[in-house]
Amino acid sequence: MSSTVPESAPPKAGAREWAGLAVLALPTLLLALDQSVLFLALPHLAESLNPTGAQTLWIMDVYGFMMAGFLVTMGTLGDRIGRRRLLMTGAFAVGVTSLAAAFSTSAEALIVTRALLGIAAATLMPSTLALISNMFQDGHQRGRAIAVWASCFMGGTALGPVIGGVMLEYWWWGSVFLLGVPVMLILLVSAPFVLPEYRDRDAGRIDLVSAALSLAAILPVIYGLKEITREGWAPVPVIAIVAGLGFGTLFVRRQGRLEHPLMDLGLFRRGAFTASLLVLMFAMVTMGGSYLFISGYLQMVEGLSPAEAGLWMVPSAIVSIVAATLAPTLTKRVPMSVVIGCGLGVTTAGYLLLVFVEPAGGLPLLVTGFVIAFLGTGPIGALGTHLVVGSAPPEKGGSAASLSETSGEFGVAFGVAALGSLGGAVYQSAVSVPAGVPEDVADTVRGGVEGAVAEAGGLPAALGEQVLGAAGEAYTAGLNTVAAVCAALAAVTAVLATTALRRGGGGGAADGEPGEPGEPGRTDAEGSLQPAGDR
């Protein structure tokens, strides 16, 4: 038997590519930290800047709004001007806006700098993922590289509260924003030496109308979902979502008429691509909703500080990182669809354990269920993202990466909104306010567990304990209900992954390539994706 490597075999990555992966891991870790570290800084920030309630919400949310809104545009922009160029431009912008945020002297200034930071961050995520897909053309190597990328994102999310707690112990609130400065400096210095430049020379110009329509579609939907979480099904957020869906329809129709669309709708004709996006989005729905209630249980029911709650969440992050790292190795022997489906089966079991958590002494079972749930979710971040990016042609890598990130943002936002509303409704129907509580205080207690905890401190000790007990029982009932819904959704997603991914081209275990059946590995054979001449 001949051992000659076929001419069509994609090249293996070398030392330069693996060094480049280490550089690309830095912004991924940073962006995950940025999304979780601000929760700890908020009380310190409020003392210094004295924001209004509305300003506080915008400080928290505007970063995510802007990043989600610009992901599609930035992913396609990288395909056109060069992915390394966009990454370095974004890194410089992140460094500058991080400095500006750290030294903001008013709430208004911080809102503006957080908005600019979100736009700058939108350049980083699709650029890092698209460059990984270019640097690692071998299927198995690309799978391992994306697993490292996904692990950095998971690890950063869990470590944010821990690192933030340490920094706030010794420095002022703005120090949490300074994390981005040294990270971006390292990226800017090292990127020209270890990262290649890729661009699609046939991509054409960006259609500005499409870019505006994408913003008009994404921003109102994300805003509406977040507002529903806080205010319930009020007219304004519902109108915002409907308007966003309307603009989204116009956006899709326009893409079908353009020679060089901002979003290539042809990607959705690839079975593995569409199925992977759906699996990723549904998985993020369960993660967003469950994370909201688990973190709330730790702080509102168990009475832990944010830093202590963050420490209890570290084990779940560790197992998800391990699972994501090992998943590509499993696909050498087992089809990807089976690995992802079985992982979601494990996730289902973890959420079922959360159904039985009780308000008193429920911490061990809560942490166990959360760890098991995240153990099963780990492979999705690695293999699902691998399938999304690997199913797209090389010249569409940035666009595919941005769609992967956008689906995740929508999944988390929808999970927090829908499951948060469900859990809130269960809480309000289950809470029993003790006799003797003033009516105005009782209304606050019925409104949510946060209000109950805040009001309990102003009541006589015995009555305050009764209020906390009643609120804890009702909140735990909401957690149990949300966990049951997450278990059902995870089970349905497991079936979707096992069947649709197999039909869509994600079932092969031999070569690790997630392309459509009949496609060889992802190469530059057609010449549509051109290196920029720096290698």
Image: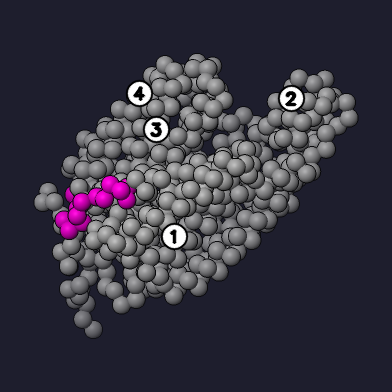
Inspect the image, locate mark 4, and give the three-letter code of the amino acid beneath it: Ala
Q: Is residue 517 left or right of residue 52?
A: left
Depth-wise, is mark 4 or mark 3 nearer the camera?
3
| Residue annotated with mark 1 | 277
Of 516 and 303, nearer the camera is 516
Inspect the image, locate mark 3, and give the three-letter code of the amino acid beneath it: Ala
Q: State which tag comes first along the sequence, 4 or 3.
A: 4
Q: How is the image coloured?
A: one colour
| Magenta stretch, residue numbers | 196-211
Q: Residue at x 44, y 39 (%)?
A: 65
How far across and down, in percent of the image, does residue 169 sit?
51, 21
Is disc 2 placed on a helix, strand or loop?
Answer: helix
Inspect the image, locate mark 2, and give the three-letter code of the amino acid beneath it: Glu
Q: State which tag comes first along the sequence, 2 or 4.
A: 4
Q: State which tag comes first along the sequence, 1 or 4.
A: 4
Task: Assess whether residue 236 is covered by the magenta stretch.
Answer: no
Q: CA distance from mark 3 to mark 2?
A: 33 Å
Query: Residue furthest toward the left?
Result: 533
| Residue annotated with mark 3 | 115
Q: Is residue 3 left or right of residue 162?
A: left
Inspect the image, locate mark 1, and give the three-letter code of the amino acid beneath it: Leu
| Residue annotated with mark 2 | 455
| Residue annotated with mark 4 | 100
Q: State which tag comes first along the sequence, 3 or 2.
A: 3
Task: Assess whether residue 202 is covered by the magenta stretch.
Answer: yes
Count of numbered badges drawn on the protein: 4
Q: Is residue 511 above or below residue 161?
A: below
Q: CA distance from mark 3 to mark 1?
A: 27 Å
For label 4, count other residues whose C-alpha is less than 10 Å away and answer few (under 14), some (14-19) or many (20+). Answer: many
